[in-house]
Amino acid sequence: MKQLALAILLLYFSQDITAQYYLRGEVRDEKNNILQNVRILLCSKGTYPFTSGNSGSFGIPTSRAIDTITLLLDGYETLRTAVETNKFQRLVMKMLPATASLYKHRLASFTKNLINQDQHYNFSTNESYNNQVENEFIETSTFSETGFALNIDRASYSNIRRFLNMGYRVPPDAVRIEEMLNYFDFGNNTNTSTNSFTCTTEVTSTPWNRENQLLFVHLQAPKLNLEQLPPTNLIFLIDVSGSMDKPNRLPLVKSGLKLLVQNLRDKDSVAIVIYGGDVGVLLQPTSGGDKNKINSAIENMVASGSTPGEAAIRMTYKLAAKAFNKNGNNRVILATDGDFNVGQTTEKELEDLIVQQRQSGIFLTCLGVGMGNYKDSKLETLAKKGNGNFAYLDNLQEAEKVLVKEFTKTMYAVANDAFLSIQFNPTFVKEYRLIGFDNKSDALNDSSSELEGGEVGTGHDLTAVFEIKPNEKVSNNVADSIITIGKYAMMKLQYKLPGASEYTTQTIKVPFNYGRIEAAQPDLRFTTAVIMFGELLKQSKFAQGYTFTDVWNLAAAAADKTDYAQTEFLTLVEKARKIYSGDKKKKKGSEE
């Protein structure tokens, strides 16, 4: 024992002799964000590496008054500089161009050379939603080309359902029409390709304006062979803070995750990180075949404490990187009400945080729950910047839909950074309006904003719709061959295959196959009803000349009565009719 104490004492004095200085400092980027896990080399220490901590800080003993420090971090320029070791060092690393582009505001849709006018909607609520600017009609002669990201999110629809089922009006910014359209599966996915999209288009009349037309664009993603799906490496990041202590929050998440676990294979793996007061790893990576162990860990989650979401996200990605399977599907599943209240909590701070993790090859799926303090805007930001998707779970049936029935669509990406551009021929199209895919106001106000491509899962189908004001020379009875010769429109689909750095491009011709909406296929008529419903809820200026009753009549005539989602839609339209007409009656009564 005495020998051990003597050895420690000698070591202490030897360090004191060789390490006369202690270099302290912190590392940040040009946006003043802290940078953790930066690899640090000191000339006096040779190749022995040090790293910055969670707060971006570091402390290194050295024998030199002046030393040379080198900082290395993926996505950033190497920084090498001389430092005075007796002074606190504030070091700034510059992003590489590819990294800097990730921090730019991203647009859901984009029209070349068009300057958008800002609009504002006001809605008083403790929940938060991104302020959106509805797309306007655009003159084709001036701006003939537009485009939009392929968005497979569906969160808006189930969130709308939650409001209506509770008898409340829907916040206008909670309504994202493209997500409402995505929610429905019309069962017509016939794409058997494993490496390319298929596309169909159709032009019909417009129910609310007989002089205009609707252009439907339906895309079907490549479909992977289910038996050959790669192993899945999942990290559950679960909010167990005090705000999750309600039946429709943590208990709902636990039930949904157990449903997911039932379908995992032996070659899949699951780890669980929880945050509520503290952050910790509840379950280290475990084979999907050990379902009892995984379910036991899920069942042991109890809600309490604050919401340190920032620290939890950092720990989760660190664990995901450690368990990374280069031949598998690596994904973080975050379940929360989004009410972060410790650490970086604003949308901008969370956006910067998740962008730092984006290049790791780990995808992010966000599951939102709860009401009253639900932060839709934060989850949308995390999902978009995390190269992933998000859904809102309002009941166990929705959890089963997202985590079981649509698991492969949600979890297995077949295309990344996917977007579609379309160029209309001004000879035939006077003006056009993209319905849905509305942009956030801050993205529109940023002149450096760029169109952000979306992540698309296997077998997913997506519908986009344009309202068209045709030129007078193009009547609704014109022969299709006349317009085909002159090109009614041309589309270009661009996306990256998983793991690829170059874009794959598909060019698609748009024929003028016009027909009356009354004679169109049921799925097109039902889609039109969903659009009308969304614009009424959004209180859109384009929702003119029709009512909730008109929406119900159109949907009822087209709905597949064997499809639960479509029949439920009819119920929601009826509830909305009563809620919104009831508000009008109350106002009249108060005036009297």
Image (tube, rainbow, N blue to C red):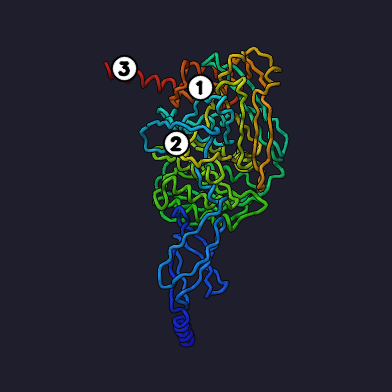
Which one is closest to the eye, mark 1 or mark 2?
2
Q: Is residue 291 visible?
A: no
Residue 359 image offset from top left, x and y in percent: 58, 51
Q: Residue 441 got which mark?
A: 2
Question: Which image quadrant is residue 477 in?
Answer: top right
Asked whether 306 or 459 is in front, the reply is 459
- On screen, residue 517 versus residue 352, left or right, reads right
Which one is closest to the eye, mark 3 or mark 2?
2
- Element at label 2: helix
Residue 185 image offset from top left, x and y in percent: 61, 29
Question: Which image quadrant is residue 87 in?
Answer: bottom left
Residue 580 image offset from top left, x and y in percent: 40, 22
Mark 3 or mark 1: which comes first in sequence?
1
Is 222 drawn above or below residue 361 in the view shown?
Answer: above
- Element at label 3: helix
Q: Which residue is mark 1?
A: 532
Q: Which residue is mark 3?
A: 588
Amino acid type shown at disc 2: Ser
Amino acid type shown at disc 1: Met
